[in-house]
Image (tube, rainbow, N blue to C red):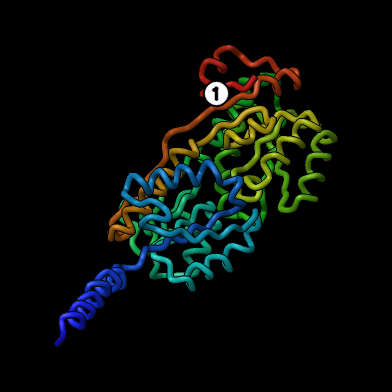
Amino acid sequence: MRRREFITLLGGVVTSWPLAARAQQPAMPVIGFLGSSTPDLYAARLRAFDQGLKEEGYIEGQNVAIEYRWAEGRNDRLPVLAAELVDRHVNVIAAGGGTPSALAAKAATATIPIVFAVAVDPVEAGLVASLNRPAGNLTGVTSLNVEVGPKRLELLRELMPTANSVAVLVNPTSPVLTEAFLRDLQVAAPALRMGLHVLHASTERELDTVFAALGQLKHDALIICPDNFFNARIEQLAALALRYSMPAIYQYRPFVRAGGLVSYGSSEREYYRLVGIYTGKILKGIKPSEMPVQQSTKVELIINLKTAKALGITVPLSLLGRADEVIE
């Protein structure tokens, strides 16, 4: 063999090594994220989710890919979106859209690992066999957003000592969540000398109708059930509450930032960070059945003092002192 031919052949072999090495690298794992509303409304949650993944050594675009599916506040879309993620053969599904998304993901697959984020008891909802030993392909994180429902009644009592009639807005298309939320409120209301009146809305037109009726029904305040449909319409809910001069309490800070009176519920940042951590652990090979269901225990109280003044409500100093944030 001539020297020139040998060098040419050797160069071809050397050039092929990195190509072969790249071909042998494992494919980047893919997370399927099932959201209940839109990317804009999930911005804070996604930042927290990414932080949790990072703590486990995963960064989107570098060593993990994420396929997003958004239901835009329509629970009826979740089963189709979950099926799309299953067809995509993702490595794990992060059902970050509450109970409806977790149930849709569970119905779509019995083999792909699922990490849920729910506010209800996951055993009672049929997601897992037990909290310590989930079994099957699901585990996840629970928030306190249903459990602290009675505390929201207590906060309204502090804000409005003479209030005796409270409307509760629920989404009838989320029966598991709605039933759990109402059950706890109905137990707590008599001790606070408050009557409850349940109102239903699952469309934007029904929201307008409900708020128009609130003034006629002479309710003193409104509690909004934590739900995907309402999460996707936080600004609309805050605007309607202001338009009809209705003191309202919800679960998340964005409601108060948009003009709502008060929010009390689990910290979104802590909640979704834990979901990201669990998702990362599954990518590392830990089975869902080996991961006990976690509970996000950090809660936040946010008060909009400007809205309180507009409603003629004097916020007690004791309550202001306990608030995590006061918007003026």
Q: Which quadrant is the C terminus positioned in?
A: top right
Q: Is residue 123 visible?
A: no
Counting from the top left corner in percent of width and height, residue 290 is at 28, 57
Relative to 21, is 130 on the left or the right? right
Relative to 213, is 1 on the left or the right? left
Quarter of the image for residue 298 reads top left
301 to 278, vertically: above or below:
above
283 to 297, vertically: above or below:
below
Quick one: which residue is furthest to the top in this view?
Answer: 317
Q: Residue at x 35, y 68 (%)?
A: 27
Relative to 276, is 254 on the left or the right? right
Assign a secondary structure to mark 1. strand
Quick one: which residue is furthest to the bottom in this view?
Answer: 1
Q: Is residue 323 visible?
A: yes
Q: Residue at x 39, y 58 (%)?
A: 64
Q: Which quadrant is the N terminus positioned in?
A: bottom left
Counting from the top left corner in percent of width and height, residue 58 is at 35, 52
Q: Which residue was labeled with disc 1?
A: 325
Quarter of the image for residue 219 reads top right
Label 1 neighbourhood size at 10 Å, few (<14), some (14-19), many (20+)?
A: some
Q: How many tags in the picture? A: 1
Counting from the top left corner in percent of width and height, residue 160 is at 68, 21
Of 254 and 170, which appears nearest the observer? 254
Of 12 and 263, which appears nearest the observer? 12
Q: Amino acid at mark 1?
A: Glu
Q: Residue at x 27, y 75 (%)?
A: 16
308 to 268, vertically: above or below:
above
Counting from the top left corner in percent of width and height, residue 199 is at 73, 44
